Image: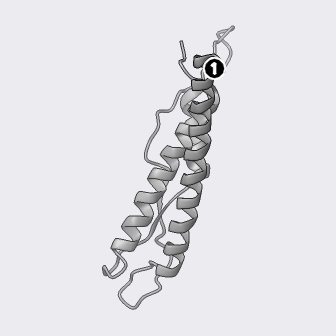
Amino acid sequence: MKLFSNTIYSLEKALDYSSLRQKAISNNIANVDTPNYKAQDVSFKNLLSNEMNSQMSANRTNEKHFEFTNSKRSNGSLITKNDTAYNHNGNNVDIDKEMALLAENQIYYNAITQRISGKFNTLQTVIKGGN
């Protein structure tokens, strides 16, 4: 039995995405002067695909039907940008872009936490009986 609704589960996954993206951006900023360091980012498309595949299941009603393989989640959502080099030392971290991404991710995280807080406040109100 699920304790919370699908909305809270989706918000939890959004927080996971934001956390993973925060780590990638922080690593990029920390390695801005590291020779040959390549920037990393989180691919939302890959993350969404992995989540959808990990939850998919199907029953075969006929032996001629194809089997569905349930692929487990890998770290395929974290991608490294190997095709560019902005600095003379082979590093491709653009500090201005990373700082903008950091601010964008912070706004996204704040919006998700406010939304999940509102959901829990609604649950608390229901449990108390509307008082």
Name the residue at 56% across, 39% down.
Answer: 117
Residue furthest bottom as drawn: 88
Residue 60 in picture, x, y percent from top left: 65, 12
Residue 43 in picture, x, y percent from top left: 56, 55
Residue situated in front as seen by the camera: 68 or 4: 4
Name the residue at 64% across, 10% down.
Answer: 63
Seen in the picture, residue 17 relative to 86 is either above or below; the reply is above
**Rendering quarter of residue 11:** top right
Q: Secondary structure at mark 1?
A: helix
Residue furthest left as drawn: 34
Q: Is residue 94 visible?
A: no
Residue furthest front as drawn: 131
- For the C terminus, the image quarter is top right
Position of 96 with respect to 6 (left or right) is left
Residue 46 in picture, x, y percent from top left: 57, 48
Q: Is residue 44 visible?
A: yes
Name the residue at 54% across, 60% down.
Answer: 105
Seen in the picture, residue 54 relative to 107 is either above or below; the reply is above
Crowding around mark 1 (Cα neighbors within 10 Å: few <14, some 14 to 19, many 20+) is: few
Please name the colour scheme applied to the rendered image: one colour
Q: How many marks?
A: 1
**Rendering quarter of residue 93:** bottom left
Amino acid of disc 1? Val
Seen in the picture, residue 8 relative to 82 is either above or below; the reply is above
Give the residue pinned by disc 1: 126
Name the residue at 31% across, 79% down.
Answer: 34
Residue situated in front as seen by the camera: 75 or 17: 17
